[in-house]
Amino acid sequence: METTYRKVLEHIRMAFLQPISNRVHDSYFVYSIMRAIEAVYVPDK
C-alpha cells in the first residue's frame, strides 16, 4: 500500500506548480508558450 501511495503522491505533486524552479515544469511551460505562439503567428510567404 505504501508504494502505491508514494506513486500517487508523486503524480499529484507534478500536477501542481511548485514555488521553486523545476526543470520539467519549466520545459513544459516554455513548450506550451512556443506552441501557442506558433498557433497564432503566421509568417508572410
Image (tube, rainbow, N blue to C red):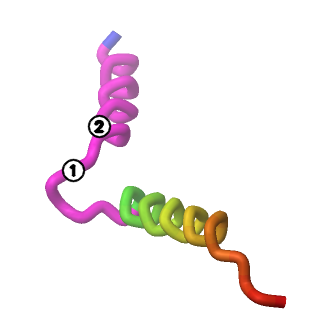
Q: Are marks 1 and 2 in contact (CB under 8 Å)?
A: yes
Circle nearer the N terminus (1, 2): 2
Residue that appears at 56% across and 63% down: 36
- Counting from the top left corner in percent of width and height, residue 10 is at 34, 34
Q: Which structural element holds mark 1?
A: loop
Determine which residue is flagged by label 2. Answer: 13
Does 32 appear above or below 8?
A: below
Residue 13: quadrant of the picture:
top left
Horizontal placement of 35 versus 15: left or right? right
Determine which residue is flagged by label 1. Answer: 18
Give the extent of the magenta segment: 2-23
Q: Amino acid at mark 1?
A: Gln
- Counting from the top left corner in percent of width and height, residue 42 is at 71, 77
Q: Main secondary structure of the magenta part?
A: helix
Residue that appears at 41% across and 59% down: 24
- Residue 44 versus residue 21: which sits nearer the camera? 44
Does 8 appear above or below 43?
A: above
The image quadrant where one finds the N terminus is: top left
- Counting from the top left corner in percent of width and height, residue 18 is at 21, 50
Q: Is 5 part of what is drawn in magenta?
A: yes
Q: Which structural element holds mark 2?
A: helix
Q: How many marks?
A: 2
